[in-house]
C-alpha cells in the first residue's frame, strides 16, 4: 500500500519540526511542494493539527501503547503521532489512518518496527478517541493535558480569566485556522475577498492569491495576529521591539521605528525579504537571541513577543512595562 502525498508531506513536516527543531511554517512549504490545492490543505491540517495536539497525542500513545514516546525511533514517533491525530481529532477513515501510518514506518526503512507500529495503531484505533474524550479539565493541569498546552499557560489563563473562559480560549485556539489575509496598505491593488466586520484590513478568502502575495498586496495573517498588532497601536515616532518576529506579519503591520529580532539566521533572511516585498521600510531586522539582546536594543516604547511554536501565546507589553529588564525577566520565567 502506498502513502498518499498529503500524509507524506504531513509526516515530513512533523519529523522536521520535532526531530530537527525546524519551524513548521518553513518546513511545510518544502514538504508540500508540488501538491495540488486539495492535498496541500489536507497535509497542512494534518501536520499543524498534530503539532498543535502533540502533548495529548503522546499521552494517548503512551497510555495505550505502553511505551515511552521518547524512546521510539524518530520516524516511528512521527508516524504514530500523525496517525493518532487522525484517529482522535479528524474524520479520516480509520483504516486509512492506521494503514498509511504503518506504511510510513516501512518507507522509512525500519522493517523491524512495522509490526510494532501496526500493533500500536490498532490499539489506538480501538481506544484513543474514548481516552481523549474522557480526559478531565477541572484543574489547570488536567486542562493543559486534555487541550495540549503547557502547564504555565493553563495556570496563567485560569488565574486571569477563570476556568470557563480559559477553557473556551483553549478550545478556540485549537480550531483549524481560517484563511485570512491582511491587506497591505503600503501597496495599491485589488484583492478579492470578504472584509472582516471587526478587524480593519482583514480579508476572508477561499485561498491565498499567490500572485497578490508575490506583489506585496497581501500577507497571510490570522485575525488574532492582526488584532495583536492593532493592540500595540504604535504610531510614528515610537520605537517598537518585536521578538521572535519572523516571518514578519505583525512587524510589517506596525507603524513607527520597528526593530524585528529573530534568533534563526534563515528566518531572519526570510523576514528581510518579506519586509522588502511589503514595502515595510520602517522595519530593521536583527538576527539575535531575545535573551541576550545587543546593548543598543533598549528604551523601546512597545516590546512584543510571540511564542515561535504556539503563535497564540502573544505577550504585548503596555508602556508601563517598557523596561527591557522586566521583559527579559518575564521571558525567562516562561520556558
Image (spheres, rainbow, N blue to C red):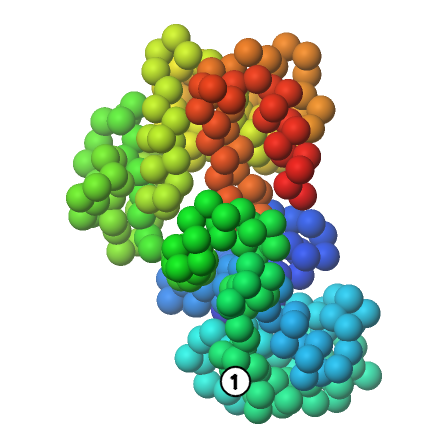
The residue to which callout 1 is attached is 130
Residue 148 in view here: no
Crowding near the residue tagged with mark 1, few <14, some 14–19, many ≥20 C-alpha atoms within 10 Å? few
Residue 78 in view here: yes
Which residue: 17% across, 44% down? 197
Q: Residue 60's image quarter? A: bottom right
Q: Could you say which is closer to the camera, residue 27 or residue 282? A: 282
Left or right, 332 with reference to 254: right
Which residue: 65% across, 72% down? 59
Which residue: 26% across, 56% down? 206
Q: Secondary structure at mark 1?
A: helix
Left or right, 17 with reference to 173: right
Q: Residue 333's image quarter? A: top right
**At which x and y percent is residue 58?**
66, 70
**At which x and y percent is residue 321?**
51, 22
Q: Please determine whether, in this image, residue 10 is positioned above or below residue 275.
A: below
Q: Could you say which is closer to the camera, residue 101 or residue 301? A: 301
Q: Residue 182's image quarter? A: top left
Which residue: 64% across, 89% down? 123
> Which part of the image, by quadrant, shows the N terminus?
bottom right
Q: Could you say which is closer to the camera, residue 140 or residue 252? A: 140
**At which x and y percent is residue 258?**
47, 19
Q: How many marks?
A: 1
> Which part of the image, by quadrant, shows the C terminus?
top right
Left or right, 92 with reference to 81: left
Left or right, 286 with reference to 91: right
**At which x and y percent is residue 121?**
64, 85
Amino acid at each position: 500500500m502506498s502513502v498518499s502525498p498529503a500524509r507524506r508531506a504531513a509526516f515530513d513536516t512533523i519529523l522536521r519540526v520535532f526531530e530537527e527543531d525546524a519551524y513548521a511554517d518553513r518546513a511545510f512549504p518544502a514538504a508540500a511542494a508540488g501538491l495540488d490545492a486539495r492535498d496541500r490543505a489536507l497535509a497542512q491540517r494534518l501536520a499543524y493539527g498534530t503539532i498543535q495536539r502533540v502533548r495529548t497525542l503522546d499521552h494517548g500513545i503512551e497510555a495505550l501503547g505502553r511505551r515511552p514516546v521518547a524512546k521510539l525511533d524518530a520516524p516511528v514517533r512521527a508516524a504514530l503521532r500523525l496517525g493518532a491525530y487522525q484517529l482522535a481529532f479528524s474524520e479520516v477513515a480509520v483504516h486509512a489512518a492506521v494503514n498509511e501510518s504503518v506504511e510510513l514506518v516501512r518507507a522509512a526503512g525500519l522493517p523491524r518496527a512495522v509490526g510494532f507500529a501496526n500493533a500500536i495503531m490498532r490499539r489506538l484505533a480501538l481506544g484513543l478517541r474514548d481516552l481523549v474524550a474522557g480526559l478531565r479539565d477541572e484543574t489547570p493541569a488536567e486542562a493543559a493535558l486534555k487541550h495540549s498546552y503547557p502547564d504555565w499557560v493553563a495556570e496563567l489563563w485560569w488565574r486571569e480569566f477563570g476556568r470557563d473562559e480559559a477553557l473556551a480560549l483553549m478550545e478556540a485556539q485549537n480550531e483549524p485556522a481560517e484563511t485570512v489575509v491582511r491587506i497591505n496598505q503600503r501597496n495599491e491593488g485589488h484583492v478579492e475577498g470578504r472584509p472582516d466586520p471587526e478587524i480593519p484590513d482583514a480579508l476572508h478568502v477561499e485561498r491565498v492569491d499567490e500572485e497578490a502575495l508575490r506583489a506585496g498586496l497581501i500577507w497571510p495573517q490570522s485575525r488574532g495576529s492582526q488584532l495583536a498588532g492593532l493592540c500595540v497601536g504604535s504610531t510614528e515616532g515610537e520605537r517598537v521591539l518585536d521578538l521572535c518576529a519572523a516571518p514578519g506579519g505583525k512587524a510589517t503591520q506596525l507603524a513607527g521605528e520597528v526593530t524585528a529580532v529573530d534568533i534563526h539566521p534563515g528566518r531572519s533572511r526570510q523576514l528581510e525579504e518579506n519586509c522588502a516585498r511589503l514595502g515595510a521600510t520602517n522595519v530593521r531586522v536583527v538576527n539575535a537571541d531575545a535573551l541576550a539582546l545587543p546593548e543598543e536594543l533598549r528604551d523601546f516604547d512597545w516590546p512584543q513577543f510571540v511564542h515561535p511554536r504556539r503563535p497564540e501565546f502573544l505577550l504585548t507589553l503596555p508602556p508601563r512595562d517598557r523596561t527591557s529588564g522586566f521583559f527579559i525577566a518575564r521571558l525567562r520565567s516562561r520556558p
